[in-house]
Amino acid sequence: MAIDIHWIRDDASLASHCARWRQLPFVALDTEFVRVDTFYPQTGLVQVGDGRSAYLIDPLDIGDWRPLAALLEDPAVVKVLHACSEDLEVLLRLTGSLPLPLFDTQLAAAYLNLGFSMGYSRLVQAVLGIELPKGETRSDWLQRPLSELQIRYAAEDAVHLAELYVALGARLAEDKRAWTLEDGAELVANLRREVLPEELYREGRLAWKLSRQQLAVLRELYAWREREARRRDQPRNRILRENSLWPLARYQPTDLVGLGRIEDMHPRTVRQDGETLLRLIRESGATPPECWPEPLPEPLPMEASGLLKRLRAVGQAEAAHLQIAPELALRKKTLEALLKSGFPNGPYRLPDTLRGWRRERMGQTLLDCLGGERP
């Protein structure tokens, strides 16, 4: 089937098309990017589908992204994406805006119990009966000119994504459509909740095993790595490998020889940033006790596994009742946060991450499983 493809290669054309798209009930959006040696994604293409045609926006030729930002923020136009976490980063980087309302077709498929975390090609096959060609996702989207195969791949994504929205929307009950949009809004909100570099250490591997003084060092190392990755536009592990952070905070080497012996420490890091790392360790390790972080909570003990299983059963039962993918109901991190709020003897408190329909339908049942505290 021939696809009607339109290129957008200047600011005036983008503004004109965005004005027209804002008169539509929805647009499908996709992006192609390269992110191999950089911290930030390098955008190679933005695709828009309006249900009839595919529009390919060449970001290398666009200087004014304000019209697209206005489209993304227009509450009257549903923005349709698939498995969109990385696309959201690309759009935020390009335009400074994020799409709302957001309809993620991967989420919609899960609410229809077609499968959880379904890939795009598989979903197109299951819903539209179309077998897509092998993907071009690993090709160089920054090259010019793009190959005919790349252009076709990008255009088909935009066209079929719009078709998916129509087909899935026809099958979604009103409540499940609302939940899909609710989860889409949560994805956007999570991206807007930027974690401060000084807070990143809390998610570090085995960080709970460190003393408060060691946590002060770990906190500084994580913060420095994050800032340097952004400043240099390089992947975090290119700056300092993840597996090196904990032993650096634990053993706190004082010279380059000791630094080089740290687990998974790349020789390049020692050469390029060794003296800086030693200074950071020395200075953060010498901070007064009143400036040390509080101890991090230990993981839940084995004795909590039975309770965790009971809580999971609440989500599984609700998913079966609603006929949705069971993975959608309750996330493991949410259940662990609930248990940590009061284990072993309570009282328990529903975590902030349990929101919306999940909190309304399952919040009290979860608390009842743990002893009947009110939400």
Image (cartoon, rainbow, N blue to C red):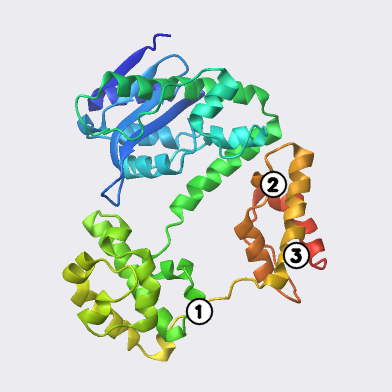
Label 1: how many residues lie within 10 Å, few (<14), some (14-19) or many (20+)? some
Q: Is residue 111 left or right of residue 161?
A: right
Secondary structure under the numbered disc 3 in the rendered image: helix
Q: Looking at the image, which residue is at 69% across and 49% down?
A: 358
Q: Is residue 289 left or right of residue 295?
A: left
Q: Where is residue 229 shown, x and y percent of the image?
A: 28, 59
Front: mark 2 or 1: 1
The residue under label 2 is which amino acid type?
A: Trp
Instruction: Give the Cα separation between the discs numbered 2 and 3.
Output: 22 Å
Report the residue marked by disc 2.
Answer: 357
Instruction: Give the Cα separation between the discs numbered 2 and 1.
Output: 36 Å
User: Can residue 279 be seen here?
Assistant: no
Q: Quadrant of the N terminus?
A: top left
Label 2: how many residues lie within 10 Å, few (<14), some (14-19) or many (20+)? some
Q: Where is residue 138 shown, x and y percent of the image?
A: 33, 35
Q: Quadrant of the C terminus?
A: bottom right
Q: Nearer the viewer, residue 261 or 78?
A: 261
First in sequence: mark 2 vs mark 1: 1
Q: Where is residue 149 shown, x and y percent of the image?
A: 31, 20
Q: Where is residue 126 shown, x and y percent of the image?
A: 59, 24
Label 3: how many residues lie within 10 Å, few (<14), some (14-19) or many (20+)? some
Report the residue marked by disc 3.
Answer: 307
Report the residue marked by disc 1.
Answer: 209
* Extreme-top residue of the structure: 1
Q: Looking at the image, which residue is at 70% across and 74% down?
A: 343
Front: mark 2 or 3: 3
